[in-house]
Image: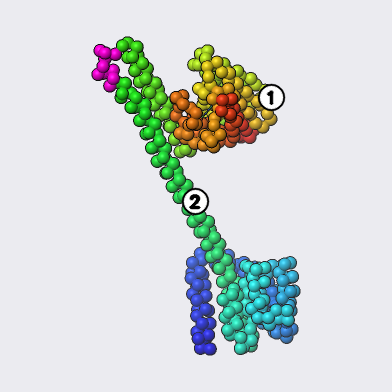
Amino acid sequence: MASNSYFTVGVIGFWIVILNFRLGRLSKEEKGKNQKNMLASALKILLIEDSLAEARLLEEFLQQAKSKEFSLVHVKRLREAIEQLNQDSFDAILLDLTLPDSQGLASLPPLISLAPSIPIVVLTNTNDDELAIEAVRQGAQDYLVKRQVNSQLLVRSLYYAIERKQMSESLRELNRTLETRVEERTAELMKAKEINQLKSEFVSMLSHDFRNPLNAILLSAGFLQHHEKKLTQEKKHAHYQLIRSAIKNMAQLLDEALVLGKADAGKFEFRPAPLALKLFCHDLIEELELSIGEKHQLVFSTGGGFAEALWDENLLRHILTNLLANSIKYSPEGGIIRFELIGQEKIVIFRIQDQGIGIPEEDKERLFQPFHRASNVDTIPGTGLGLAIVKRCVEAHGGEISVQSEVGVGTTFIVTLPVMVQAYCG
Ligand code: ADP
């Protein structure tokens, strides 16, 4: 019994310390606001008590309170209490632990689960100390021994219960916010780790891809230096040609790596501006035709309607030149490359189709990853960065890209971009 009393004193002491701590931490403004709120309206109490006499007495005590007005709703059974809680909101519950339809602590869980934010003060008989403490352990805010209750004690207990409940609710809320922050930070760290790993992989791939043309340059330059007199004009020309194409390859690698780096650093800004899309594509085709000569045939066609819309010219150029250049590069001489531009109400479709070497099934999945080149490229030069850049540009434009391809038959890339009109962009 003595240990129980110590425990009771301990529990109450603990709450008073916490309460003082919280009150101490409340700003003057908050304190004033809380007090005003408490005083502004009557506190609504749900009393669950089967004895009418006890209920009347408690009501009397509350009426005697000078500091505050209370409005009491009295029910005799747990079932009725649940009905009340479903219909109305209360500031606190006074709960007798001996009810006709529920005994002892069994009344607590349904009430707590139905109204988790309403504080509960349990009412016990003189010999129910252990039960009362267990009730506090299980989520009640306080307990009162019926025979010892008076107006002052009852009112104070209700105030404290409400205050403690509010405090535990705000602590829980704070806890939830902290948990979310921790989860967010963990996700950010994981992402940063992933990005770091990708970066170091990228750097090692890049240096590997630089080494090949560098070695070729070193070898040819050495040959030209040491065997200058012995080499025929033709051989010399071949070595100079090799050096030139190795340098070209490195320059392209550097350019594409820079573009990709920019995209991954989030510096690929989407800058939509009014653009005559058909004319833009037309000019792009003409530029390409000039650089490829007669080796391939580019066929451009359009369908559908094109309302005035906003496009990011820079992103579009990256997307289309990469896809068209690939179609040319991976097609045999004389191959036809079809470029279709289809305008619909909300989207525009770009279809680039070739009759080239095609893409093996097992390579399709990794096609848009940096440095990935399909197994059938043979000696066709490339960096494996073009499609990775295209994908980022398409995403920056809010669109999608897909590919259909069959080895030896040909490849079709389909880019779908949403149409953005002036009104949507402000
Ligand atoms: P690359 O510089 O190697 O062309 P890309 O990133 O542009 O790099 O393309 C990645 C790979 O996808 C290419 O190496 C090639 O294997 C395949 N590919 C892309 N476009 C085509 C195409 N039109 N026809 C066949 N293969 C293609």
Residue type at mark 1?
A: Gly
Residue 289: x %, y % from top left: 53, 16
Separation of residues labelled 2 and 1 (CA atoms): 44 Å
Residue type at mark 2?
A: Ala
Residue 357: x %, y % from top left: 54, 25
Magenta highlight on residue 226:
yes
Which stretch is magenta? 222-231
Label 2 residue SS: helix
Please tell me how crowded label 1 is: few (under 14), some (14-19), or many (20+) other residues with Cα within 10 Å.
few
Examine the rendering and report whether any part of residue 141 can be seen.
no
Residue in the foreground of this view, choosing between 224 and 202: 224
Residue 120 vertical placement versus 221 (above, below): below
Instruction: Report the residue at 44% width, 24% height from top.
Output: 379
Q: Which residue is mark 1?
A: 304
Instruction: Report the residue at 39% width, 31% height from top.
Output: 209
Q: Which residue is mark 2?
A: 187
Magenta highlight on residue 18:
no
